[in-house]
Amino acid sequence: MNEDEKSMLEGDLQDRVITKYHSDLGITHTHIVKLPGFTTQSGYELKEIEISYQTLGKLTPNKDNVVLVCHALSGDAHLAGINTNTGRPGWWDFHVGPGKSIDTNKFYVICSNVLGGCSGTTGPASINPDTGKPYATEFPPITIRDMVKTQALLLNHLGIKKIFAVVGGSMGGMQGLVWTVDYPEMVHSCIPIATCIAHTAMQIAFNEIGRQAIMTDPNWCGGYYYDKNCRPEHGLAVARMIGHVTYLSEYAMHKKFGRNLQRPPQPEDLFPEFFSVESYLQHQGESFVKRFDPNSYLYITKALDRFELFENRPAKEVFKNVKARFLVISFESDWLYPPSQSRELVKHLKRCNISTTYINLDTPYGHDSFLIKNPEFSRALSNFLNAEYKYITNNTNNNH
Amino acid sequence: MRKNLYDTVIEWIPEGSRVLDLGTGDGEFLERLIVLRKAKGEGVEINPDLVTKCIERGLVVHQGDILDGLDQYGNGAFNYILLLGTMQELIDPQRVINEAFRVGKYVIVSYSNFAHLRARLQMMFIGKAPVTSSLPCPWYKTPNLHFCSILDFMDFCDDIGAKIIKSAYFKKSGQVKFLPNIFAQYAVSMIEKA
């Protein structure tokens, strides 16, 4: 078995069974800051918000080396290094660390949990200051732009005015795009990975199945389950199972599981075959339930579905002030966010005269290709960041 | 030989031009062009490993085939479109050149001359498809789908409504001025829409 195949079978770092893992960063921590809130895009006033975030590396004296990483649907602020609470590495430890693609010896890397999330940033499970109880479904519908606004508040709090690169896959890529449009003066470069400018009906459909699984779980109770001793865990697990299938590819699943049986038939089994892939999905569902709030899943998937970068305006107008230079990455085997969606984005950018490099990598592991060990992906990412950093440091020197 | 050809292309391009290099490979030439001519250059390349090398050089490059690459840009986005060494590998060169005229004012095309003396002699005396230093692969391995001579290229330009502005011809030892259709192994021409 070659290295690439091994990496694929190892999977991503979010829910895989970790027995032994070494992170070059060692133990890292997240912090929580409480800041005055803002009015969401839908017009709801959030009085205050808490933001969970992590920073890695050192900020240069002229603060020109900030890399902001935006996480996807199921990610969190714990980007890399070992989390002492869970004993697990951060979700992007393969790609962030000393000497890695996003080199913490060189860059000051920031990652925060999204608004509506459940890992420290204000979301449906947080206490509503008006009622003293969890928001539950009184939490306002949120958008990708609200998530970005939350990050902007955090950066302002940290005294950061320039982002060297904003990087993110999937939902993280959408946040990156919004950053370049809503804060054009702040962003030097943007790397949207396996993302799109708006969900298609199919992408909305998969999310809706997930939401229905949660909302039809009798334990959901209209979202007010926080004071009960049961949660819609079964619904969330099913939602995760569906999601997980869409993140993989036929090749990756077949390579990993084939038609293998998890165990020999037992007398009490309804059906004699218990396939490995069934067991895997059940494990994915169960481990996700432990770390994710079902209401957050509803709110975040809806934010994904509502996302529309252009919001009925012409691309030329939306991109008018964009200063960022782009590296757009897609994966040939990604059928959830197919390369055609990245190409659509690239064409809009290029036709608006925005400097855009596009690479479609032939990695066969589906949408998850950016979450696993992936040397081709690492190379593209680090080459771009290094070349761009050289570009800005040369330009600053020339100006002196 | 190729170096002479590439140097000629660099000479032809005025400083500060906007240039799109189709089939840019690892980006070595495009980088040179940008540095020497202070050009605003971008590339199109289909091979992801080569695209990664271009990224390392800090180039702006689009991964895709040539028509897909051209399709990314609006009308008149460039002054010069470079099609160096790949025209004979294209399924439909006419379509590509027409699309290139949409995106850029001038197209600079290079190709191997199939009517070079050595090729003629091999055809005449050995009776086989020629294998020479400028056409190094046997017929079943060559990436070239279309074989043409310098005269053929002129006919082609007439046919598609393109005007040849200037041309240069090359063999191993340098430029060819005398009877290029016999003595040149490579040709490069700058064309525009007639």
Image (spheres, coloured by chain):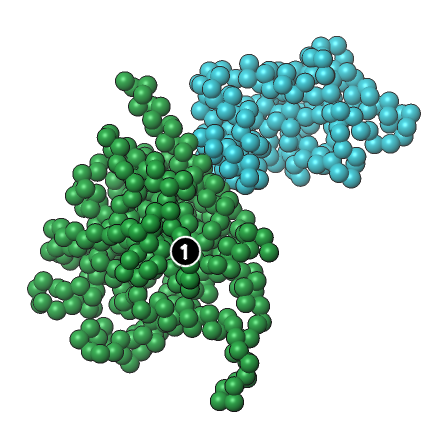
Chain colours: A green, B cyan
Front residue (pair A157, A334):
A157
In the picture shown, does residue B135 fall above or below A298? above
Residue at x 84%, y 23% (from the top left corner): B120
Callout 1: helix, strand or loop?
loop
Front residue (pair B18, A138):
A138
In the picture shown, does residue A360 fall above or below A288? above
Q: Can residue B60 be seen in this view?
A: yes
In the picture shown, does residue A11 fall above or below B69? below
Front residue (pair A37, A276):
A276
Left or right: A175 as drawn, with respect to A271 = left
Residue at numbered disc 1: A21
* Location of residue A333 in the rendering, given as x and y in whole percent from the top left corner: 52, 54
Image quadrant occupied by the N terminus of chain B: top right
Q: Mark 1 lies on which chain?
A: A
Front residue (pair B36, A264):
A264
Q: Is residue A171 visible?
A: no
Left or right: A90 as drawn, with respect to A7 = left
* Location of residue A112 in the rendering, given as x and y in whole percent from the top left corner: 26, 51
Quadrant in the picture for residue A281: bottom left
Residue at x 46%, y 65% (from the top left corner): A245
Residue at x 30%, y 56% (from the top left corner): A83
- Count of marks placed on residues: 1
Residue placed farthest to the bottom in the image? A267
Q: Give the residue type that dot 1 points to.
A: Tyr
In the picture shown, does residue A159 fall above or below A85? above
* Location of residue A302 in the rendering, given as x and y in whole percent from the top left corner: 30, 62
Residue at x 47%, y 34% (from the top left corner): B55
Left or right: A100 as drawn, with respect to A145 = right
